[in-house]
Amino acid sequence: SLEMGGIALDSAKEGRARRNASIADWAAQDQQQGGGIVGSGPIGAESNNFTNIRDNPANNWQGQTGANKGFAVFKTPEEGFRAAAKTLNSYAENGINTLDGVIQRWAPAADNNDPNAYADFVSKETGIPRGDSINPADPFVQKAILNAMQKFEVGADKAAPQEAVNAGVDM
């Protein structure tokens, strides 16, 4: 396992059985607690879209089953994180190479977001300074950033396990 910001990140081959078991355990527990039911919590958690990707028919995401209040709905959390990783790949292709740049693009102030508070949170969670040069297309960086972003978007209590983030990035 590699570690970033105190988060263990499994390689693609490491711990697949453990990852699948813990995701299944989490999903069962979430369902028992009322998760995954429209109206029961944050839109992102209800929609397997823990980073709140906006619906855009042009994207045609793998596993997208519809939209909920303007946000994409995914069949599984992993497919939602896959879409988030693909979005970070496009940011890298377009020259966005800092945490500040990622957050400014992901959650612009024009959409009633607070990009400074968001970037501060992700920076604190990951240990990545806001202005440092990063590669948003690097899976190691994606796993750390997306895990922090989902906690900001839906709250740590509704966040998917790190294993779901890892699996989505690795898809």
Image (cartoon, helix red, strand yellow):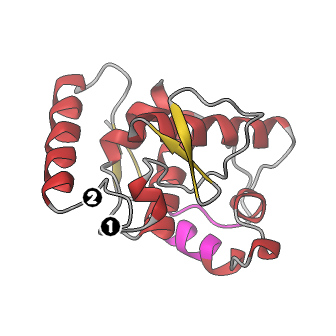
- How many dots with numbers? 2
**Contact between labelled residues 1 and 2, with CB atoms less than 8 Å apart:** yes
Q: Which mark is residue 35?
A: 2
Image height of 67 relative to 159, above or below: above
How many neighbours does mark 1 have within 10 angstroms: few (below 14), some (14-19), or many (20 or more)? few
Report the residue at 76% width, 72% height from top. Answer: 111
Residue 74: horizontal and vertical position, in percent?
A: 48, 39
Horizontally, residue 97 falls left or right of residue 136, namely right
Q: Which residues are magenta?
A: 118-130
Residue 26: horizontal and vertical position, in percent?
A: 19, 48
Q: Which amino acid is tagged 2?
A: Gly
Decide whether residue 124 is among the magenta residues.
Answer: yes
Horizontally, residue 31 falls left or right of residue 83, namely left
Residue 104 lies in quadrant: bottom right
Q: Of callouts 2 and 1, which one flags the residue occurring earlier in the amino acid sequence?
A: 2
- Residue indicated by mark 1: 40
Horizontally, residue 112 falls left or right of residue 28, namely right
How many neighbours does mark 2 have within 10 angstroms: few (below 14), some (14-19), or many (20 or more)? some
Q: Secondary structure at mark 2?
A: loop
Q: Which amino acid is tagged 1?
A: Ser
Horizontally, residue 137 falls left or right of residue 157, namely right
Report the residue at 51% width, 35% height from top. Answer: 65
